[in-house]
């Protein structure tokens, strides 16, 4: 039972093994690694809890019909544009966006929508002022424009590579 | 990151308040669903941050920096994409790092490929992505996005 849990949560097992190895080799550096890791985790706790709150809201309030209508096959190209817009506006690290997107996917959104959101997400609209500060307007504008241009083809390509039916998917978040 | 967190928290709290006013039962269900998802994500999040800590301690930035000092433009473009794919850290950090690459003589398209790849390709977060979406999706998405990042970098060289 315990062994099965560690096999399923293999990332946890990997982390534990690496830390054991680092701890034996260089205890101080392993401790420093643990400290910087936990500092970063603490800095995103509020964010993680809030986004999970959002996942709960989406699951209960947004009906499958509505998602399928807006982001499913039947919505046509509009769904793809909407996905690009959502991706541009989203903020936060990707590992909290994944469960949110999977929830939307389970409610009937296309694979292309999930991919386009993740691609357009690289635009980082809320952070553009920062990019301009470091790299200048021409660079920032060209990068955002091209990222958006590539988002939809990327989404459609990934969707073509996915099986049509839902039976192979692991739906465990 | 804390500001981002507070923005999300405010937004979600307002949505919950509206939800509870409209239908307390559905509000309660949302909270339960949220708790369930959070609970299932906790081991994964702990593992990821523990690994990020190890990465930061054992893979110093100078090491990444030397990869981009290549004379060969195409090689530095590829390296930019690769470094962005492997490195982890907050998206905000990509801009100052890319700017320091350019200052030290990196080819601007390589810096652009680095940013796009940093934000949307994640080798380290691949296990999490696969855990949530399945391996097939995670692998294809990351591979295709990686090549898109290289192309975007190249085109920026033509535009800027």
Image (tube, coloured by chain):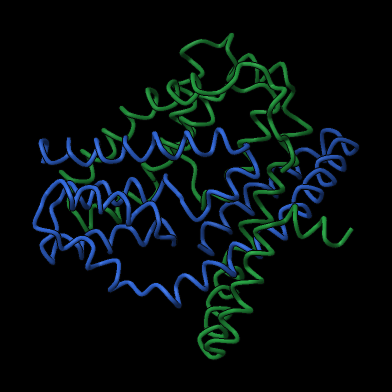
Chain colours: A green, B blue
Viewer-proximal residue among A152 and B154: B154
The image quarter containing residue B15 is: top right
**Residue for point 47% across, 26% down:** A158
The image quarter containing residue A43 is: bottom right
Above or below, B93 against B121 in this view is below
Residue B157 place in picture, x, y as percent: 12, 41
Above or below, A146 against B12 in this view is above
The image quarter containing residue B159 is: top left
Quarter of the image for the C terminus of chain A: give it. Answer: top right
Residue A63 place in picture, x, y as percent: 74, 23
Above or below, B157 against B89 in this view is above
Going by the image, does B95 lie left or right of B130?
left
**Residue for point 29% across, 58% down:** B95
Quarter of the image for the N terminus of chain A: give it. Answer: bottom right
**Residue for point 51% across, 53% down:** A93
Viewer-proximal residue among A147 and B22: A147
Going by the image, does A44 lie left or right of A84?
right
**Residue for point 76% across, 60% down:** A6
Going by the image, does A147 lie left or right of B47?
left
């Amino acid at each position: 039972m315990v062994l099965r849990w560690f096999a399923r949560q293999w990332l946890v097992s990997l982390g534990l093994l690496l830390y054991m190895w680092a701890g034996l080799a260089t205890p101080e550096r392993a401790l420093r690694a643990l400290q910087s890791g936990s500092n970063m985790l603490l800095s995103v706790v509020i964010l993680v809890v809030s986004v999970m709150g959002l996942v709960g809201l989406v699951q209960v309030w947004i009906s499958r019909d509505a998602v399928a209508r807006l982001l499913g096959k039947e919505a046509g190209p509009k769904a793809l544009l909407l996905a690009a817009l959502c991706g541009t506006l989203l903020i936060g690290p990707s590992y909290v966006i994944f469960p949110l997107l999977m929830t939307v996917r389970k409610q009937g959104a296309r694979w292309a929508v999930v991919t386009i959101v993740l691609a357009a997400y690289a635009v980082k609209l809320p952070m553009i002022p920062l990019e301009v500060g470091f790299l200048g307007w021409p660079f920032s504008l060209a990068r955002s424009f091209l990222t958006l241009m590539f988002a939809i083809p990327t989404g459609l390509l990934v969707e073509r590579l996915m099986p049509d039916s839902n039976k192979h998917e692991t739906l465990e978040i | 990151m804390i500001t981002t967190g507070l923005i999300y928290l405010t937004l979600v709290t307002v949505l919950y308040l509206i939800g509870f006013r409209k239908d307390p039962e559905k509000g309660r269900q949302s909270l339960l669903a949220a708790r369930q998802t959070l609970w299932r994500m906790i081991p994964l999040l702990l593992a990821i941050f523990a690994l990020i800590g190890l990465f930061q301690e054992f893979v110093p930035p100078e090491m990444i920096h030397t990869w981009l000092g290549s004379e060969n433009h195409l090689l530095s473009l590829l390296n930019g994409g690769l470094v962005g794919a492997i490195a982890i850290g907050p998206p905000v950090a990509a801009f100052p790092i890319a700017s320091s690459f350019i200052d030290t003589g990196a080819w601007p398209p390589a810096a652009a490929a680095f940013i796009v790849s940093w934000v949307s390709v994640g080798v380290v977060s691949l296990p999490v992505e696969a855990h949530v979406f399945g391996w097939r999706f995670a692998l294809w998405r990351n591979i295709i996005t990686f090549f898109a990042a290289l192309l975007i970098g190249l085109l920026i060289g033509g535009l800027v």
